[in-house]
């Protein structure tokens, strides 16, 4: 029950950030979104800072789990590469509320050391996953360069989605990633063994 309540408050935090922005997402606003009292929020999280850090950590865990789930289903090197791409752009993550939350957190990283540490882990994990997935196709040092370029493309898709009035378009983001991969690697992706 405790874990369920914590997850509920984290989801309410994501929704609040999407609705009113990082600064205006107060404990009372988050509590109202979750349908509980501010005292309940303080029971689970010492203050807003702890709740925001827990929210960013949960978003990072969701991202990691999304990639791992697809990697388990991947049967070919091309599918393993797309597992990383789709894991970062999948519909369970690439949605308006999560996109707004990520952008808000990224904007706070320069002044919040705990958020900066989480961001560093996320960036390193994405790069490492891409390098590993690209090694069947490229040699060093090109694998590092292509991994960096593809990571930048993925980050750019999140930024574009956050700033677009239309919101996230996962299909468009996936097409852009596939176009980049096929142009740089001269491979065909084909159908992937998961629903993207």
Image: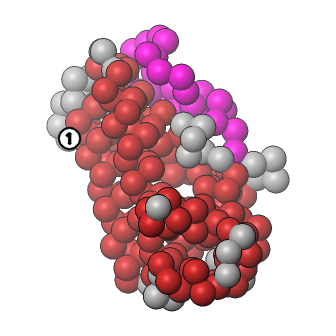
Q: Is residue 156 left or right of residue 109?
A: right
Q: Is residue 74 left or right of residue 5?
A: left
Is-magenta flag for residue 61?
Answer: no
Q: Nearer the viewer, residue 11 or 113?
A: 11
For the rendered model, the colour scheme is secondary structure
Relative vertical location of residue 188 with respect to residue 149 in this rendering, above or below: above
Q: At 39% from the left edge and 75% from the top edge, which residue is drawn? A: 116
Residue 146 appears in view: no
Q: Nearer the viewer, residue 11 or 149?
A: 11
- Give the mark count: 1
Span colored in magenta: 168-196
Q: Which residue is mark 1?
A: 141
Q: At 43% from the left edge and 40% from the top edge, which residue is drawn? A: 66
Residue 40 appears in view: yes
Q: At 57% from the left edge and 80% from the top edge, which residue is drawn? A: 41
Q: Secondary structure at mark 1?
A: loop
Is-magenta flag for residue 191?
Answer: yes
Residue 96: give x, y in percent of width and height: 70, 52
Q: At 54% from the left edge and 37% from the top edge, which residue is drawn? A: 90
């Amino acid at each position: 029950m405790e874990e369920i309540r914590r997850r509920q408050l984290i989801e309410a935090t994501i929704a609040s950030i999407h609705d009113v922005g990082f600064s205006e997402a107060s404990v009372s606003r988050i509590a109202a979104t979750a349908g509980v009292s501010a005292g309940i929020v303080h029971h689970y999280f010492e203050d807003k800072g702890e709740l925001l850090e827990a929210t960013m950590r949960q978003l990072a865990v969701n991202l990691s789990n999304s990639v791992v789930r697809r990697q388990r289903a991947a049967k070919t090197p091309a599918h393993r590469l797309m597992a990383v791409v789709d894991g970062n752009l999948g519909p369970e993550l690439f949605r308006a509320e999560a996109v707004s939350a990520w952008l808000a957190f990224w904007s706070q990283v320069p002044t919040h050391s705990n958020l900066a540490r989480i961001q560093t882990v996320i960036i390193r994990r994405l790069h490492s996953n891409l390098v590993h997935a690209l090694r069947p196709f490229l040699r060093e040092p090109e694998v590092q360069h292509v991994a960096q370029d593809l990571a930048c493309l993925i980050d750019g898709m999140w930024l574009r989605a956050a700033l677009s009035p239309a919101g996230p378009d996962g299909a468009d983001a996936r097409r852009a990633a596939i176009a980049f991969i096929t142009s740089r690697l001269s491979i065909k992706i084909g159908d992937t063994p998961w629903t993207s």
